[in-house]
Image (cartoon, helix red, strand yellow):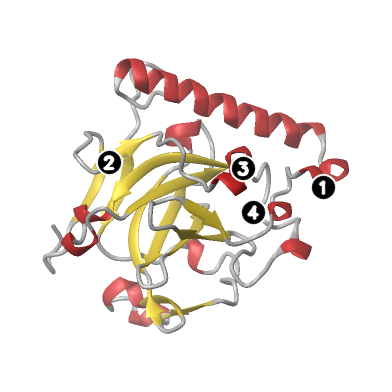
Amino acid sequence: MNNEGKYYKEEISELQEGLTPFPEDVFLSNQSWLKNYLLPLISIDLGLLHKNLRGTVLHILNPTEPYEGLIGEETTDFHNEFCGENWIALELTKDNKYQFLGSENYFLSAPIHKDKTDEEFVQHVKEIHQNYKNTKNEYKSKGRLLPWQEDNPQDFLDRLGGETWYGNWTNTASIPSAFEMTVAEVSEKQLPNDGISISYRGKEFMYIAEVSGYSYCGEGADSILMFYEPENRIVLFTYDWT
């Protein structure tokens, strides 16, 4: 718990009820192609953070991109008000599945871009899928995250609950136009949430959790940050590259 009485925990190495690594069937059937681009790492029942949200389950996703740079950096023609450079958004259905609020062509590894990618990029995508599969198999057999050595298990989550924090993610790329984000001046960082506010149609996002992509896939962003706006059931992701 933090000093305001809100649930907050760091470096979660032991699972508890409400946390489910490597969830299955998290995307709508008409967007099954999402499994090519977004890897489900762990599901979180929001009842852990807010009793009135028990049964609402979010899934942290690790993109298979980028190889270099930022996700969405090379597909600007397919950005929209919900998905842009270093930001993606999904809608959570009533049965806790994700509907991506963008086009498949947002992803550089989509078929339409096959003539724009090189062998290094293609190999990176293959490797991150294989790393994910290997770590998933190790978890099923040993109950631990082992993307590397047997004696180096990784945390299931780096942070759960608490407040948003100021970092590179706040100014790496502009938030998509559907959302509003304000960031306090450096001198005002003693404010709640480090002076950061993210909203959709006037409704504030909650900071939910974060984890490193390489904890599950051997590589990825230093921090995958997940936010949730419960009235419109919008899940927002961004990535911190420290």
First in sequence: mark 2 or mark 4?
A: 2
User: Label 1's element?
Assistant: helix
First in sequence: mark 4 or mark 1?
A: 4
- Between 224 and 89, the one lying in front of the other is 89
Relative image position of residue 235 (x, y in whole percent): 44, 61
The three-letter code of the residue at mark 2 reads Leu
Residue picked out by circle 4? 70
The relative height of residue 172 versus residue 35 in the rendered view (above or below) is below
The relative height of residue 122 versus residue 5 in the rendered view (above or below) is above
* 27 displayed left or right of 125: left
Q: Can you tell which of label 2 and label 4 is closer to the viewer?
A: 2
Q: Which mark is residue 37?
A: 3
Residue 227: quadrant of the picture: bottom left
Number of other residues with Cα within 10 Å of mark 4, as a class: few under 14, some 14 to 19, many 20 or more: some
- Between 159 and 228, the one lying in front of the other is 228
Q: CA distance from mark 1 to mark 3?
A: 14 Å
Q: CA distance from mark 4 to mark 3?
A: 14 Å
Relative image position of residue 134 (x, y in whole percent): 49, 20
The relative height of residue 157 versus residue 149 in the rendered view (above or below) is below
The three-letter code of the residue at mark 1 reads Ile
Q: Which mark is residue 19?
A: 2
